[in-house]
Image: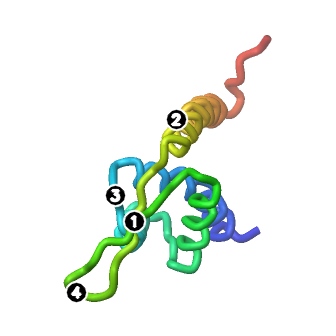
Amino acid sequence: MNIENTQVQMRKGILEFCILHIISRGEVYASDMIIELTAAKIMVVEGTLYPLLTRLRKAGLVDYKWVESSSGPPRKYYTLTEDGKTFLSSLDETWDELVSSTQKIISVKKNSKSKS
């Protein structure tokens, strides 16, 4: 098995969650999302991000507005919809449960499992 493939799959699994969190802070441009995700070592390219944003918009979780730019073409800024906020709140609960469950599993040392 290739460790890099497994690491990429783990990061991809939380990509949508991270994107929704970034958008939840307020209007955000796609390039800024890519910069933040890359800085957090969740590598993403435009070819991955834009289809995901389109899917989130079609699901009614995000919306966007066009804003004129003095340095080029208009820019699309994304925001969470009310449904998106509710959806993200549910994902936050799931995330907390997953982190707790994972910590319980990975914190058990070899040969120190509690006996029932």
Q: CA distance from mark 4 to mark 2?
A: 36 Å
Q: Disc 4 versus disc 3: distance between alpha carbons?
A: 19 Å
Which residue is at a point 71% across and 29% down the rendered structure image? 111
- Whole-number angstrom distance, CA of label 1 to CA of label 3: 9 Å
Q: Determine whether, in the image, residue 76 is placed left or right of residue 104.
A: left
Q: Nearer the viewer, residue 99 or 70?
A: 70
Q: Earlier in the sequence, mark 2 or mark 1?
A: 1
Residue 76 is drawn in which quadrant? Answer: bottom left
The residue that mark 1 highlights is 65
Q: Nearer the viewer, mark 1 or mark 3?
A: 1
**What residue is drawn where x is 68% and y is 34%?**
110
Residue at 37 percent of width and 66 percent of height:
77
Callout 3, which amino acid? Glu
Q: Are marks 1 and 3 in contact (CB under 8 Å)?
A: yes
Mark 4 or mark 3: which comes first in sequence?
Answer: 3
From the image, tell me which residue sits under label 3: 27
> With 104 as the anchor, is 78 left or right in this view?
left
Q: Mark 3 and mark 2: span between their CA atoms?
A: 18 Å
Which comes before the other along the chain, label 4 or label 2?
Answer: 4
Quote the CA–CA distance across marks 4 and 1: 17 Å
Can residue 107 be seen here? The reply is no
| Mark number displayed over residue 71 | 4
| Residue toward you, 88 or 84 | 84
Mark positioned earlier in the residue sequence (4 or 1)? 1
In the picture of the structure, the residue carrying the numbered disc 2 is 89
Q: Amino acid at mark 4?
A: Ser
Q: Amino acid at mark 1?
A: Lys
Q: Residue furthest top?
A: 116
Q: Quadrant of the N terminus?
A: bottom right
Would you call the spot at circle 2 few (<14 residues within 10 Å), some (14-19), or many (20 or more)?
few
- The local secondary structure at tag 4 comes to loop
Determine the secondary structure under disc 2. Answer: helix
